[in-house]
């Protein structure tokens, strides 16, 4: 697995002058604009991913993927794709996956060349399972997706993430945070791949229920849009088999070319909105950082203990703490 050396300085790749091969990957129509408002081309997007690869690949490689393809660029026809499209190069690997509906074929990548091949095929969003292809039945991370409904202040979303962090800490679990590139935040917990999907989902559902019990005025577990105005949807369903979450540093197929960006918890308090990180400003932000806020992510060895699993099922809402509003 690729690991970034924190002592290395970020170096932008040299601008290509019309060349169609970028880091060994043939990019056709490199001048095609994929984010119209910013004038970002396929070449620009490939060079962006090359520049953030050391940070991104550890959270991407060898995970089953769901892709959002926009062959004509953002704002045109986009669609989700889980199976390999025709003509996909060998740098994007195929993976037999069995579901209740029957056998299927998924995709994953192992390196930068695989990631850039996705750019070639018009991929503007990369979403991944919470498990690797090597331990596909045992997730190695948990994601709490905090998705605010209409009329929810950003400060409340930040408070919700801090609340989840503190609650998980009481269960002896260290968590990390990133923007989604949309309206919300992801609280992400690395775990040892020991428990099956059913137990991990049960645990995350219980955590979400505890949050709801602590503050039903500000949280909901309902996906219904009618139930979400003024509330934050605590989406724990990212933690079931086959579900995905947007990968750190992936772009989103949205106006402004936003990026899902890992943050330090202190940095989160200073962040003004979920979509402030973009293709155009992420690299300067990374240059200014003293350290990678997710530098410890891959080093942490923790698991959902039997005691934590038992206690969360009978947790009292008052034990969660205040919401810092």
Image (tube, rainbow, N blue to C red):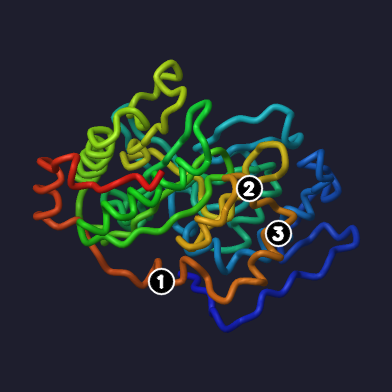
Circle 1: element type: loop
Q: Mark 1 points at which residue?
A: 296
Circle 3: element type: helix
Q: Which numbered disc, 1 or 3, marks the residue that appears first in the sequence?
A: 3
Q: How far apart are labels 1 and 3 at the CA level?
A: 23 Å
Instruction: Give residue 296's position: percent from left, percent from top.
Output: 41, 71
Instruction: Give residue 71's position: percent from left, percent from top.
Output: 72, 36
Instruction: Give residue 288's position: percent from left, percent from top.
Output: 65, 71
Q: Which numbered disc, 1 or 2, marks the residue that appears first in the sequence?
A: 2
**Camera-nearest residue between 62 and 104:** 62
Mark 3 and mark 2 in contact? Answer it, CB < 8 Å.
yes
To which quarter of the image does residue 174 belong? Answer: bottom left
Residue 12 in the image: above or below residue 127: below
Q: Mark 3 points at which residue?
A: 48
Q: Mark 2 points at which residue?
A: 251
Residue furthest out toward the bottom: 7
């Amino acid at each position: 697995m690729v690991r970034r050396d924190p002592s290395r300085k970020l170096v932008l790749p040299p601008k290509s002058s019309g060349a169609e091969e970028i880091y060994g990957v043939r990019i056709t129509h490199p001048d095609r604009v994929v984010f119209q408002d910013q004038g970002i081309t396929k070449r620009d997007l490939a060079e962006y991913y090359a520049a953030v690869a050391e940070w991104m690949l550890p959270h991407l490689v060898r995970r089953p993927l769901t892709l959002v393809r926009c062959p004509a660029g953002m704002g045109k026809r986009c669609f989700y794709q889980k199976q390999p499209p025709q003509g996909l190069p060998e740098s994007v690997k195929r993976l037999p996956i069995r579901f209740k509906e029957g056998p299927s074929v998924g995709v994953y990548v192992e390196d930068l060349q695989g990631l850039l091949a996705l750019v070639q095929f018009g991929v503007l969003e990369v979403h991944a399972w919470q498990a690797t292809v090597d331990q596909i039945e045992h997730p190695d991370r948990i994601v709490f997706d905090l998705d605010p409904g209409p009329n929810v202040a950003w400060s409340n979303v930040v408070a919700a993430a801090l609340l989840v962090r503190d609650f998980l800490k009481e269960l002896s679990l260290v968590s990390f945070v990133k923007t989604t590139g949309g309206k919300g935040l992801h609280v992400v917990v690395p775990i040892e791949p020991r428990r099956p999907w059913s137990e991990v989902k049960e645990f995350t559902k219980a955590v979400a229920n505890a949050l709801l019990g602590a503050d039903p005025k500000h949280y909901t577990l309902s996906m219904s849009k009618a139930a979400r105005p003024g509330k934050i949807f605590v989406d724990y369903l990212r933690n079931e088999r086959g579900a995905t979450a947007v990968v750190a540093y992936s772009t989103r197929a949205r106006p402004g070319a936003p990026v899902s960006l890992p943050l330090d918890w202190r940095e989160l308090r200073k962040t003004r909105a979920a979509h402030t990180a973009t293709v155009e400003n992420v690299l300067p932000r990374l240059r200014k950082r003293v350290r990678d806020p997710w530098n410890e992510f891959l080093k942490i060895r923790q698991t959902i203990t039997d005691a934590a699993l038992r206690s969360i099922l009978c947790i009292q809402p008052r034990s969660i703490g205040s919401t810092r509003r």
